[in-house]
Image (cartoon, rainbow, N blue to C red):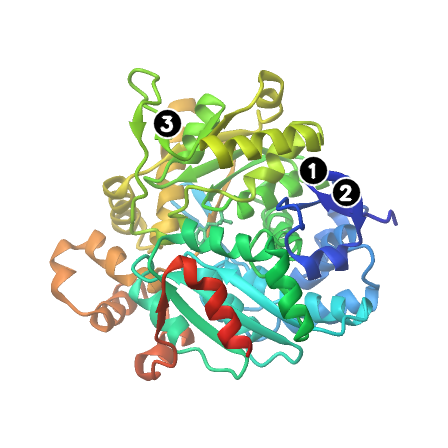
Amino acid sequence: MKNIMYHSTRDNNKKLTASQAVLQGLAEDGGLFVPEELPKLDVSIADLIKMDYKGIAYEVMKLFLTDYTEEELKYCIEHAYDNKFDTEEIAPLVFADGAYYLELFHGSTIAFKDMALSILPYLMTTAAKKNDLREEIVILTATSGDTGKAALAGFADVPGTRIVVFYPKNGVSPVQEKQMVTQRGSNVRVIGITGNFDDAQTGVKMMFNDASLKAELKDKGFVFSSANSINIGRLVPQVVYYVYAYVTLLKNGRIAEGDKINVTVPTGNFGNILAAYFAKHLGIPIDRLICASNSNKVLFDFFTTSRYDKLKEFNETDGSFDKDRKFTLTGSPSMDILISSNLERLIYLAADGSDVKDRELMSALNEKGAYTITDDMKAKLSDFESGYADEAKTEEFIKKLYDKTGYVIDTHTAVAGAVYADYKEKTGDDTVTVIASTASPYKFARTVMTAIDPANKDKNDFELIDLLNQISNVAIPQAIEDIRTAPVLHDIVCDKEDMPEEVKKFLS
Ligand SMILES: *Cc1c(COP(=O)(O)O)cnc(C)c1O
């Protein structure tokens, strides 16, 4: 099998093995690690059909993580996709009203982040052994709500690691916050910041690039790594479920071999949809990749105009960019993001792997708040469609789907559902479509239940959870039961400037 090395999107020369890239998380120059080339499947679809989720996971991950031995990878996979998931299928496909919902929320924290974060700790500790790492690994994490809990659950009490999670104090759902601040473990710390997700993510990236902070901590025996989707160890496990979805559709006779499918992904940091793009490169016949945004529609604006602008918003009526872009808190908080990190990887690929072009565009984004890609680059992105759904549209979709089918979906998934419905109406494209269902509706019970019946707004969160249980006939997940009575163990809130201080305090 071909050995695949990794390098930064901003420097093609300095090469790392996969395990080194997993350990490091983010490149020192601020870029993201990308594989030298995108691999192709070396088994046939006919072989994949005979495999379960873990078998497919091995066939996909071995192509990207080539310096892990077969034994190491299989060990990681076995321990990740076990009974932490509440179904042996790991990622069930549910058909409702003309689309297939790929339920990615059956892991222990009931959001799709578990798909990768249940394996990342194994990939990372294996990488530490392989590379004779002496220091303790400190996972710095910025979260818009779901990564935080999934990373905490994955890394709690894992020897040789510590984890610090920063979340926007007023920017996550009550269930998301309760899940995080009740986290147990001797190596964990959860900190709210007075700012939004972008502030948290920028603060974390600044610590990664702060040479003196890193040197100071290295003296004390610590190195940083990342559990965000900037880590290649997050992205690779996410490729698996798109392959699994295709194989499942085929196995169930919903498509014939070679048939194309579309995928619709509710998008924030662009990790999940980028994984679908990698799956397409592996050889899975995916036609359209539909990128769905909420009111923070910076990605829709980008795909529509070729201009990525975090400060100004595209006006569809007159084609101008003269209105200030506002960061909006929505009912789909895990997509409330204006600086979409993983897009840099796509930009790099669209620039034919030019680190020079990548650096030019990323410094324009830093310095001027915007960049525009060339027509050649735009042409390379022709696989992508995009759309957005505001709050009203999202809630309307939840209600409509429930009224019609009895199936209840979460707010993020509903953004994707609404965008897909628009796409289908506009284009008449009736290709079989998989919608990434990224969270359990229980995690966003308030918005979901008031969308279904506005009279529910006066009930408390746990009343809404019990009501959701009655109307959906879906058992209340353990993750929800766990927080009903759990004590709050973390109550630190800090300004974004003080994030490094808080990390130092935790490590001293
Ligand atoms: C993280 C998250 C998203 C966005 O995924 P990205 O990979 O950041 O694009 C969507 N929905 C939910 C529920 C999430 O937790």
Disc 2, SS: loop
- Earlier-in-chain disc, 2 versus 1: 2
Asked whether residue 464 appears in the rendered view, the answer is yes
Q: Position of residue 73 (x, y in %)?
A: 76, 65
Residue placed most toward the observer, 470 or 502: 502
Question: Residue 381 occupies which quadrant of the picture?
Answer: top right
Which residue is disc 3 drawn over?
Answer: 425
Question: Contact (CB < 8 A) between labels 2 and 3?
Answer: no
Residue type pointed to by label 1: His
Which residue is disc 1 drawn over?
Answer: 281
Question: Contact (CB < 8 A) between labels 3 and 1?
Answer: no
Disc 3, SS: helix
The 10 Å Cα crowd at callout 3, few under 14, some 14 to 19, many 20 or more, is few
C-alpha distance separating marks 3 and 1: 28 Å
Residue type pointed to by label 2: Pro
Disc 1, SS: helix
The 10 Å Cα crowd at callout 1, few under 14, some 14 to 19, many 20 or more, is some
Q: Nearer the viewer, mark 2 or mark 3?
A: 2
Q: Position of residue 389 (x, y in %)?
A: 32, 38
- Earlier-in-chain disc, 3 versus 1: 1
Report how many numbered discs are placed on residues in the image.
3
At a point 58% along the width and 42% down the height, the residue shown is 274
Q: Nearer the viewer, mark 3 or mark 1?
A: 1
Residue type pointed to by label 3: Glu
Question: Residue 78 occupies which quadrant of the picture?
Answer: bottom right
Which residue is disc 2 drawn over?
Answer: 39
The 10 Å Cα crowd at callout 2, few under 14, some 14 to 19, many 20 or more, is some
Question: Contact (CB < 8 A) between labels 2 and 1?
Answer: yes
